[in-house]
Amino acid sequence: MKDQQSNIPEALKVVESASARDCEVSLEVDARHLACPLPLLKAKQGLRNLAVGDLLRVLATDAGALKDFVSFAHLTGQLLEGFFQQDGCYCFLIRKQS
């Protein structure tokens, strides 16, 4: 578990919260069991259908998603608002900014 924790980028540790899996969202994208880059592509498609300020939850199991979503948020200006991991599933909350 400790080794798994060391793979989590600092930007995700800052927003890590169990509430990420249960809070109310505008859309949830289930990208579990999809390999990189599909979780990120599905998230981008989901964001396209949301209004500014809406919240997207993405579920992914690909460990590459950890760095992908941090980079995506940084490059596109989207707000990575929450993160949670449990049993090999990663949960990301992204608030649409533009």
Image (cartoon, rainbow, N blue to C red):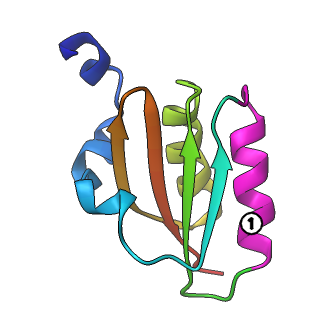
Which residue appears at 26% of the width and 50% of the height?
A: 16
Q: Secondary structure at mark 1?
A: helix
Report the front residue among 30 and 65: 30
Location of residue 60 with respect to 4 vertically, above or below: below
The answer to whether 83 appears left or right of 14 in the picture is right
Q: Residue furthest left?
A: 2
Residue at 79%, 78% in the rendered image: 49
Q: Nearer the viewer, residue 14 or 32?
A: 32
Q: In this rendering, is residue 72 above or below 33?
A: below
Quarter in which the C terminus is drawn: bottom right
Query: From this viewpoint, which residue is outermost toward the top?
Result: 3
Residue 11 in the figure: left or right of residue 66: left
Find residue 47 and report its horizontal and vertical position in percent: 71, 70
Q: Which residues are magenta?
A: 34-49
Q: Position of residue 72 (x, y in %)?
A: 61, 50
The one nearer the camera, 87 or 94, is: 87
Give the prevailing secondary structure in the magenta stretch: helix
Tell me the quarter of the image containing the N terminus: top left
Mark 1 lies on residue: 46
Residue 15 in the image: state x and y as whole percent: 28, 56
47 magenta-colored: yes
Residue at the image point whose x is 33% and y is 46% from the top: 84
Quarter residue 76 falls in: bottom right
